[in-house]
Image: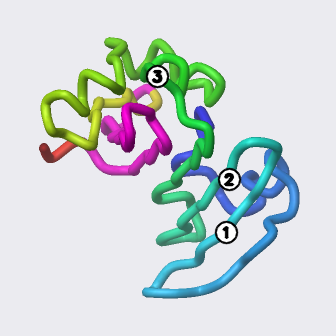
Amino acid sequence: MDGLIGAGSDEVTRRLGRPVADRSAGGGRWLRFEGRGWGLRVRLGTGRRVASWTLNLPGGTSTLREAAEPAGLWPACAPDAEAAGADATGSSLLRRRLPGPEGSTDRSLTATVRGGRIVALTAFDEPPDW
């Protein structure tokens, strides 16, 4: 998923293949991709460029690194964190700043925690506001 934010729709389909769903809603376009053990929703915004994406991890992972590394986001989203630790503090989210390409603004990454496992990663084309 590294480099997907800001990519045009043609680049997305070149990298991921044909989406299993493609629909317009809420002023944007949503593409859905599926693979073995994962699902990905991509939101295209202005100029048909990726504004955000959510990678669903049905089995979940126990650490942020385990979730981010296969997506090509490690070590950019370091430091690592245990999903169980987030649950213990009552938080269902782990948030990190992602560096943008040279000369651009940073992006945001949110890991969703449920039942002591990271079950989704979401990246946004905006700097963190939390």
Q: Position of residue 27 (x, y in %)?
A: 45, 86
Which residue: 36% across, 13% down? Answer: 80
Which residue: 61% across, 45% down? Answer: 58
At numbered mark 1, what does the secondary structure look like: helix, strand or loop?
A: strand
Q: Are marks 2 and 3 in contact (CB under 8 Å)?
A: no
Q: Position of residue 127 (x, y in %)?
A: 26, 43
Q: Residues within 10 Å of mark 2 (few under 14, many from 20)?
A: some
Residue type at tag 3:
Ser
Which residue: 32% across, 12% down? Answer: 79
Q: Is residue 114 left or right of residue 11?
A: left
Magenta segment main secondary structure: strand
In the rendered image, which residue does mark 2 sit on?
39
Q: Position of residue 56 (x, y in %)?
A: 57, 49
In the rendered image, which residue does mark 1 sit on?
31
Per the rendered image, the range of residues in magenta is: 102-127
- Closest to the camera, between mark 1 and mark 3, is 3
Task: Give the alpha-carbon distance from disc 1 to disc 3, as whole Å.
Answer: 27 Å
Residue type at tag 2:
Gly
Q: Earlier in the sequence, mark 1 or mark 3?
A: 1
Residue extending furthest front? 115
Q: Is residue 119 left or right of residue 7?
A: left
Which residue: 67% across, 69% down? Answer: 31
In the rendered image, which residue does mark 3 sit on?
62
Q: Earlier in the sequence, mark 2 or mark 3?
A: 2
User: Where, quadrant-wise, is the C terminus in this rendering?
Assistant: top left
Q: Residues within 10 Å of mark 1 (few under 14, many from 20)?
A: many
